[in-house]
Image (cartoon, helix red, strand yellow):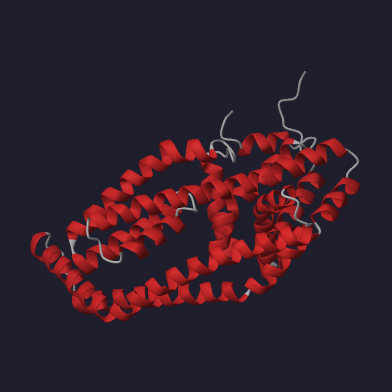
């Protein structure tokens, strides 16, 4: 008679749980060391595209790496300068924005009290406290961002080292595993997953910025350039990023100018999301990551809880690499199946 019970070895289960727990603890408590290393590796994989192109043009390896890193620095410097100048403009106008925001919230509270019989006590003070909390959160976000900028030097060093010693790392993995063909496939597919995802996301962000900025200008939305950049950059985080970037744009537009600009922002964001979901993403990225919706959401939440905003950005390509490893590892295929979107 065939047993209907599932056979699970108690010792194997304990070992598996200990390994998983150890990995989680390492990722969380070792994030100061691991995050710059992972970010450096990801950026180096992306920069390998221009490095190869310069090599094909006959440039020596050191010159190809130098030119690629220089291009990256120029792009990020221009982007940082552009964002900083816009933030500076908003900072100068913050007292006006704060005053208008409190008035708008007071009007909403009064309307709720008159029409819906919501009896808020001291709602004026509550609205002022809400604005102050938003101000504190903004400062905390800025502090977190500055902490990340302080780690850029070590990340920059990692990028150069990864690019310079790429072949040595590849040979290391080939020597580490006996199946040379399988490890070559894993390395090539993993690098392609990261590279294609971020290059595709970069193209989509440029498209979204053009759509956002054009729509905001037509609708005379305040701080159109900043809101367009902010919303486009946050779109790199699937689902959650669009809500954050779009939500900030809607709230700032409403509090500063009123309902009409806010509705224009909502319309532009909705049109952009339709274009992104049904045209840009299938065309540019396609099924490069191919993760199930559940794993996508869970992965973003999981890595953001471990590593913050950086974790949310790199969550999907990291899980995509994990899927590639599972697909080419004996007895790990069921886990790859769990991660995949298609059955």
Q: In this view, does 310 lie to the left or right of 327?
A: left
How many marks on residues?
A: 0
Query: Which image quadrant: the C terminus?
Result: top right
Query: Which image quadrant: the N terminus?
Result: top right
Q: What residue occupies the far front of the structure in this picture? A: 58
Question: Residue 300, relative to residue 331: is it above or below?
Answer: below
- Quadrant of res 289: top right
Which residue is drawn at the image coordinates 54% and 46% (left, top)? 200
Q: Is residue 113 left or right of residue 46?
A: left
- Quadrant of res 304: bottom right
Q: What residue occupies the far left of the structure in this picture? A: 114
Which residue is drawn at the image coordinates 30% and 66% (left, top)? 223
Residue nearest the observer in this picture, 343 or 125: 343
Q: Is residue 114 left or right of residue 158?
A: left
Which residue is drawn at the image coordinates 40% and 60% (left, top)? 229
Residue nearest the observer in this picture, 57 or 305: 57
Residue 217: % across, % down: 27, 58
The reply to whether residue 64 is in sight is yes
Question: Residue 185, relative to residue 61: is it above or below?
Answer: above
Question: Residue 184, relative to residue 254: is it above or below?
Answer: above
- Quadrant of res 90: bottom left
Which residue is drawn at the image coordinates 63% and 73% (left, top)? 151
Residue 296: % across, % down: 54, 45
The reply to whether residue 25 is in sight is no
Residue 206: % across, % down: 45, 52
Residue nearest the observer in this picture, 68 or 329: 68
Question: Residue 150, relative to residue 193: is it above or below?
Answer: below
Residue 135: % across, % down: 36, 76
């Amino acid at each position: 008679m065939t047993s209907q019970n599932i056979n699970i070895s108690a010792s194997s289960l304990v070992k598996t749980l200990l390994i998983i727990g150890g990995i989680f603890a390492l990722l969380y408590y070792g994030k100061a060391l691991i995050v710059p290393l992972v970010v450096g590796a990801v950026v180096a994989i992306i920069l390998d595209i221009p490095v190869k192109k310069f090599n094909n043009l006959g440039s020596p390896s050191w010159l190809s790496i130098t030119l690629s890193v220089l291009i990256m620095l120029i792009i990020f410097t221009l982007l940082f300068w552009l964002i900083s100048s816009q933030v500076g403009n908003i900072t100068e106008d913050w007292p006006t924005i704060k005053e208008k925001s409190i008035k708008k919230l007071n009007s909403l509270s009064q309307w709720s009290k008159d029409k819906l019989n919501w009896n808020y006590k001291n709602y004026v003070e509550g609205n002022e406290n809400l604005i102050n909390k938003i101000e504190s959160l903004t400062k905390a976000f800025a502090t977190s961002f500055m902490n990340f900028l302080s780690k850029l030097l070590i990340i920059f060093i990692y990028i150069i080292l990864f690019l310079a010693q790429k072949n040595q790392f590849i040979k290391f993995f080939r020597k580490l595993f006996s199946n040379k063909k399988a490890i070559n496939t894993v390395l090539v597919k993993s690098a392609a997953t990261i590279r294609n995802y971020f290059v595709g996301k970069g193209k989509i962000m440029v498209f979204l910025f053009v759509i956002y900025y054009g729509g905001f200008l037509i609708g005379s939305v305040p701080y159109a350039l900043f809101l367009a950049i902010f919303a486009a950059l946050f779109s790199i985080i699937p689902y959650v990023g669009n809500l954050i970037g779009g939500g900030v744009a809607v709230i700032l537009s409403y509090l500063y100018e009123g309902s009409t600009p806010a509705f224009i922002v909502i319309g532009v964001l909705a049109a952009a999301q339709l274009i992104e979901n049904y045209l840009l993403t299938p065309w540019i990225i396609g099924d490069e990551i191919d993760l199930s919706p559940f794993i996508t959401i869970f992965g973003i939440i999981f890595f953001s809880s471990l590593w913050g905003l950086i974790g949310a950005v790199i969550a999907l390509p990291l899980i995509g690499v994990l899927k590639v490893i599972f697909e080419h590892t004996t007895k790990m295929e069921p886990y790859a199946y769990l991660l995949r979107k298609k059955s």
